[in-house]
Image (spheres, coloured by chain):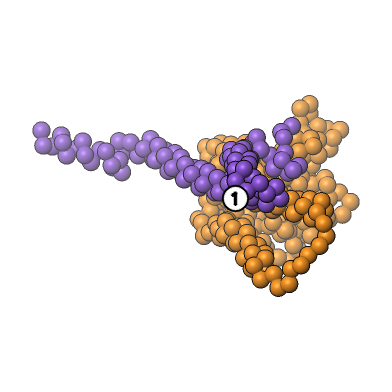
């Protein structure tokens, strides 16, 4: 059984979730502590810490998921390309055959 | 199929289901952020003094209008993207009719001659060792892998619903109406589902089993059965 944050978010199995929560926590600690050291206001520092946690967590989440989606699209294109290469190798649809064929005719 | 005590999604077997799972993860992350914020505000209100000298509060009114709108847009855009993706015009390789009865499914492959069969649940008393209770059927729906399948769902008597979670399909079976859905199984395997609309005493005992096989195997099976 995997750990679920607040009972519903599966941190271990959802891609980017663990990193988002960790970066968010670290960022919130730094921001909250930094604000307190600068201003000595406890309540406002807690507000800054929570606000920082949410912004950094969501910010990293969008960044990581965007990169993941980009990667997935590239994987799909690669898979399709490999399949087509195997399928059309040696046939008239093979794009590489046209190039080697013209080289042979020159020699 | 789902493990015991599982309430998360089953592994995706179609591109649409993969997209739905990613959207679900995205939605849960937004929900986590909102829950954190609400818990913090609740804690700070309950632990502080209940005094307020705020009069107009224009700034907070602006914030709690703009922020929820932004959250809704963040959720709506990927959601609409998947919705439109599900309705894309594709050229199905195969059309399958699924007809709900009390209490079994019947399937018709009208692209072939005489390929129709009924699919009854295997009773627990007749279940071979290692098979899944209340999920196995006598005749599975065989489909080719990596091919778009159009499913036309209807019912013969009362409302039923043809659902296969790992393919991301759930379509109501309504008497006198044809509902269309499509799916693409991107790997070979056996995918289980259950009737998802209350239809009488044996509503829980009319499962759906889709078996995705390589095209050559599907052709052998269809030629064997339709002859």
| Colour of the chain lettered B | orange
| Element carrying mark 1 | helix
The chain in purple: A
Question: Vertically, is B12 above or below B110?
Answer: above
Question: Vertically, is A55 above or below B131?
Answer: below
The residue indicated by pointer 1 is A55
Residue at the extreme top of the image, as rendered: B129
From where the camera sits, is residue B144 visible?
A: no
**In the picture provided, is B120 more to the left or to the right than B74?**
right
Where residue B129 appears, as percent x and y from the top left, is 78, 26
| Badge 1 density bin: few <14, some 14–19, many ≥20, Cα 10 Å | some
Question: Residue at (70%, 65%) from the top-left corner?
Answer: B177
From where the camera sits, is residue A52 visible?
A: yes
Question: Residue at (72%, 39%) from the top-left corner?
Answer: A4
Where residue A78 appears, as percent x and y from the top left, is 42, 39
Dot 1: chain letter: A
Q: State the residue in front, A57 or B52.
A: B52
**In the picture provided, is A107 more to the left or to the right than B32?**
left
Q: Quadrant of residue B143?
A: top right
Q: State the residue in front, B127 or B34.
A: B34
Where residue B108 appears, as percent x and y from the top left, is 66, 52
Q: Quadrant of residue B77?
A: bottom right
């Amino acid at each position: 059984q995997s750990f679920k944050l607040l009972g519903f978010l599966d941190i271990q199995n959802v891609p980017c979730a663990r990193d988002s929560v960790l970066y968010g926590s670290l960022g919130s600690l730094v921001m909250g502590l930094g604000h307190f050291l600068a201003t000595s206001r406890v309540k406002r520092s807690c507000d800054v810490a929570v606000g920082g946690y949410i912004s950094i967590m969501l910010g990293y989440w969008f960044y990581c998921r965007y990169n993941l989606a980009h990667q997935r699209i590239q994987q799909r294109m690669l898979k399709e390309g490999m399949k087509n290469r195997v399928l059309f190798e040696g046939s008239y649809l093979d794009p590489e055959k046209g190039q080697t064929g013209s080289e042979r005719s020159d020699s | 199929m789902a493990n015991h005590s599982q309430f998360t999604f089953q592994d995706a077997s179609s591109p649409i289901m993969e997209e739905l799972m990613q959207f679900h993860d995205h939605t849960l992350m937004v929900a986590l952020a909102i829950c954190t914020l609400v818990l913090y505000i609740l804690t700070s209100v309950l632990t502080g003094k209940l005094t307020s000298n705020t009069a107009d509060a224009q700034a907070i009114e602006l914030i709690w209008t703009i922020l929820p709108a932004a959250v809704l847009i963040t959720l709506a855009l990927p959601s609409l993207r998947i919705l439109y993706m599900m309705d894309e015009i594709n050229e199905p390789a195969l059309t399958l009719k699924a007809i709900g009865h009390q209490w079994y499914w019947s399937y018709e492959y009208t692209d072939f001659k005489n390929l129709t069969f009924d699919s009854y649940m295997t009773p627990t008393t007749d279940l071979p060792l290692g098979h899944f209770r209340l999920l196995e059927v006598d005749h599975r729906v065989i489909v080719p892998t990596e091919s778009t399948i159009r499913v036309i769902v209807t019912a013969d008597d009362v409302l039923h619903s043809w659902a296969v979670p790992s393919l991301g399909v759930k379509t109501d079976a309504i008497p006198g109406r044809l509902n269309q859905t499509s799916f693409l199984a991107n790997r070979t395997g056996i995918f289980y589902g259950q009737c998802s609309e209350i239809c009488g005493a044996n509503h829980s005992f009319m499962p759906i089993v889709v078996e995705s096989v390589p095209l050559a195997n599907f052709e052998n099976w269809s030629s064997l059965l339709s002859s």
